[in-house]
Image (cartoon, rainbow, N blue to C red):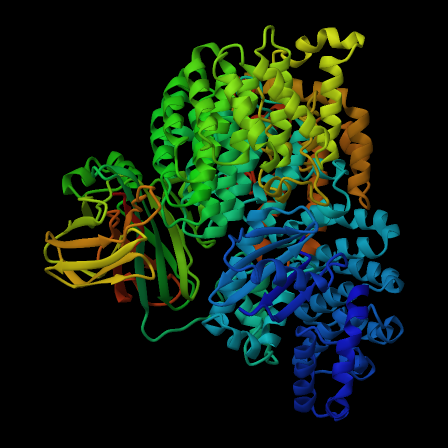
Amino acid sequence: MIGGLFIYNHKGEVLISRIYRDNITRQATDAFRVNVIHARGTVRSPVTSIARTNFFHVKRGNVWICAVTKDNVNAATVFEFLNRIVNVMQSYFSKISEENIKNNFVLIYELLDEILDFGYPQNTEVGALKTFITQQGIKTQSKEEQAQITSQVTGQIGWRREGIKYRRNELFLDVLESVNLLMSPQGQVLSSHVSGKVKMKSYLSGMPECKFGMNDKLTLDKSAVTRTDDASKSGKPSIAIDDCTFHQCVRLSKFEADRAISFIPPDGEYELMRYRTTKEINLPFRVIPLVKENSKQKLELKIVLKSNFKPSLLGQKIEVRIPTPKNTASVQLLCAKGKAKYKSSDNAIVWKLKRLGGMKESTITAEVELLPTSDKKKWSRPPISMNFEVPFAPSGLKVRYLKVFESKLNYSDHDVIKWVRYIGRSGLYETRC
Amino acid sequence: MKDASSSGSADDGALLADGKKLEDLRNALESGKDQHQIDAMKKVIGYIAKGRNASALFPNIVKLVASSQPELKKLVYVYLERYAEEQQDLALLSISTFQRGLKDHNQLIRGCALRVMSSIRLPIISPILLQGISEASTDMSPYVRKTAAHAIPKLASIDPTTRDQLIEIISRLLGDRAPLVAGSAVLAYLRVCSDRVDLLHKNYRKLCQMLIDVDEWGQLRFLEVLTRYARTQFTAPKAGKLDFDHQLLLTACQPLLLSRNAAVVLKVVVTCQELGTDEDISKTIGPLMALASGDRRETKFVALEHVYRLACSSPHLVSPYLKNFTIFWAEPEQTALLKIKILTKLAVGSPGTAHQVNRELETISFWDKEKLATEAVRSLGEIATVPELTQTTLVKLMTLINDKRENVSGEAVVSIQKLIQINPERNEAVIKKLARLFIRETAGTSNAKCSILWLVGEYANLIPKVAPDVLRVAAKAFIKEVDEVKMHTLTLAAKMSVQKEIPEQVALASTYVFNLARYDQSYDLRDRARFLKNLIFGQSELSKFAKDILTAEKPFPKKIESDERFRCGTMSSSLGIEARMYSALPDYALEASPSSLRELPKPIKTVQAKTTSSKKTSKSVSSSESESESESESESEDISGPDDESQSESESDSCSESESSKSEEELSEESAFVNTAITNAANDLAADKLADPKNQPVEIKEDISDTEATPVANIFISKDMKISRDLSPEPKSTVSSISD
């Protein structure tokens, strides 16, 4: 399937090359370097075909990871696999950088041996890999350890080993969401969705069985039927999740049957689920643009930023980018809050606010003077984009419970310390003007 | 590899030139001290990673393979995999160590030895390797069995003569009940003998149930194999009715839509498209859209390609998600382009959305991103080919022909040209406007010029006053133009010359053009000029028909959708060219194969139905079997291999007691090598228990109606013969109720 795997630095020097098939030669590394890495400025499709050899690449930081094949493969599989390699490497040496890869190439070779046999992807579960490939090299294992590996390598629970012990049983839940919005100049929502993920860090002893509950409409409705309008009485808002995907540990058949999310968690940090909602999104900010093209030489911009959440909360790291025409000569800025600056290199005014409370409003006005140009074309008015971070989930998702059951060890659900945090960030957040 | 060694010679020098370094490494490797050896090995691997040639050290390194240090061993394995093929004789020294490794008590080492031995690709060792694989395939540890399965395609590629023996091993491995092994066994099947459908019959249902337990990469292979199987064994769904086993696969794959692995989700989407009914497909849309609007760039790209294909084939399914395809300014270009393509297909396919799409495309056509804007204009042109939308879109396109960006205005003109062709009479004014554009020399690109020239020539009789003027301008600019425009000018001159009454100026201008073309640099153009001149002014028979030939009605150009050729989700479809090892989706079978083929030899089946209906089914099953008896007989012999039970089985009815006794034997035999596997211990236990009550002689009818529980599967047959199966991985122990 995959004929070879190369890792390059940003200059295009080969850091790692591993070739699995005869039909891929070492010249392929050069072909990719010349045609993709050194082809600056042009658009790089993630799939490139050079002389009937096909290259799939992902770029992380300044490192290129590239899979090569001549055979017909499923493109999604290759990308998914490349992403998985990235995850595995990240969990071994935190950041993927040239330095780290150079220092760990033996480890990478070992990992590749294990997860890509003859070009076929295999078990890529970090938990399982870590039991027999360690950074300290392979230890000579005792009998018990060997038995442990046995169960993990062969067992259905490949992501957790037995006999984990913590003095304090703790778990952390992070609900991370990114809001995407496209708004028309008239304030009409053209497209909006939230893609979120629930990240979990678990430090639990033994083999705990966890149950995760959220205010998903379907679940609540279902339970409401059985428990006679319990949910409707409490009046808690519920959200409609369009679709979701789960970590391998979640029992999918159970979710399919009664939407219960139950699982045995891996140890440490992982992503429990991803989801997407498109309805009833609480858009944290609203941008109201007003553009007046007074004359050929003058432009007046007035942008109102409104925050739309509880007054007790604070939005952070707010940045609004207001594009200006290419022939801008000078810009006069006036804003009540935050700092604004005209960046001629980006053709944009960047307005930064460290924080902004809920239900507030702030305005920036700009007078733009334009140079006369021969180009008669009208200014195309690119959309205003913004970045922010808010301490709630814009989709309205709430974690209702996370129960932990461990029958063999003597700790109960109450003894586990649980932390939940919600973070909403901007994805692509654009207002056309 | 050959190229590598030849190109490596320079690097070889680089390493060898530093003779001292090499000597140091050699000394360290020979030192006998573990730590030194490990450090040296790490350095060597470092050289390999950088693409340098380290083959000179082969004799020193091959000796270390016998080391007891696992870490050192691993490094040596890496080295051997790289260089063994070049130095075959020396590499043979290491084989005995591997053979010993295959007998190690640690399963990891057994697996590793087999993996490396199969990776070093020496044709000489294929008999040893075959034996190794054969032994490993019956190993106690699923991990080793898995490695054996992985080694099969490798051996098959080194030595094709072993294929028959390998197929035997594959058929054994396909029956394995550990999910870990099954994933790799299916891979081996796919690579070595994907034409041997007969191996799958007995395993089909088991594979369907296992699907959810296999690791994610295994799931992908499972789906591929099962899709192929289903396409060749079942008939196309008629009016939403599916074969029981066909439905089984679709039901089994749907939970995987929730998988974290994007590739799995997409594969399920494709599977449903290729096998399912519209209802099944509609279930997959949501997850597909989630991927298409996800935040991973590459996955998004692939998912959007899927959506595009879907939008082509069934736009009504995609159109509710129209909003997902609005285009963000900050989006990478290739996804934005795909989105435009999708929007276009939606507008063409379900006209209800056209208004919205048109507005979006119009917005983009004003953007400062030329490629997107051009594509948007082209798409507007495509949408306009839908009769109801032609006029409104045409108006929009007309505003764009004056755009300052050459590409955009040019594209607009080309689009309009196509539209006019649909209904020239009605659009006389538009043709005039375009002609005027040309006369004023503001038609941007040469493509646009060609389009206008062609239009004017074609409909010269509609605009008798403007056409000569166009010819005049074109003739004047002739020498400055590119070949294509010249060609079109020539055609225009020819078309004008065959009109009924032509003014003198036109005749002169045409002659001028013909003369210029005759001495042009391009021989293509010269040839064309000579041809047209003889056709129009010559004396031959054909010249009488010159007018008919030149002004014949041209059909509207149809766009060819070349993307449809390949299976969705394959790289071939992504690139638009056929990649190596692409295999097309087989057509549905004209006649379904009898379901008795897939019936498991063990009778742990449950039937929850009234006796009346079950009677019916039992009849029908036996009748269908009688049809295929000869076939199933031969196949079961193939499969069961060592235990010669097949004879008795094919003789018996589907649910008779002889079969049940067989099942027990088989179970016990199977459990001999499986029972150590932790995963299946529970399953096996339950199965063994269950087999007990079956041993007692039972009448057939009772067998159908009374036996209640299965660990693996519950089949129930409902009244209308629609059969479905519950997929519960956990064994339910209702054994007691049966024995009572």
Indicate left or right for B537 with A187 as reference. Answer: right
- The image quadrant of residue B102 is bottom right
Q: Where is residue A67 in the image (x, y as percent from the top left)?
A: 61, 58
Q: Which of A261 and B162 is in front in this view?
A: B162
Kindly tell me whether residue B605 is visible in this rendering: yes
Q: Nearer the viewer, residue A358 or B184?
A: A358
Q: In this view, does B30 lie above or below B297?
A: below
Indicate left or right for A300 with B227 as reference. Answer: left
Residue at image x 45%, y 71%?
A: A95
Kindly tell me whether residue B607 is visible in this rendering: no
Residue at image x 53%, y 70%?
A: A130
Residue at image x 64%, y 35%?
A: B483
Q: Position of residue B372 (x, y in %)?
A: 44, 41
Indicate left or right for A417 with B126 as reference. Answer: left
Q: Which of A58 and B465 is in front in this view?
A: B465
Q: Is residue B314 above or below residue A306?
A: above
Q: Position of residue B521 (x, y in %)?
A: 71, 37
Q: Nearer the viewer, residue B344 or B705?
A: B344
Q: In this view, does A54 lie above or below B234?
A: below
* On-image quarter of the N terminus of chain B: bottom right
Count of all numbered marks drawn on residues in the image: 0
Residue at image x 19%, y 43%?
A: A237
Q: Where is residue A429 in the image (x, y as percent from the top left)?
A: 29, 49
Indicate left or right for B425 with A241 as reference. Answer: right
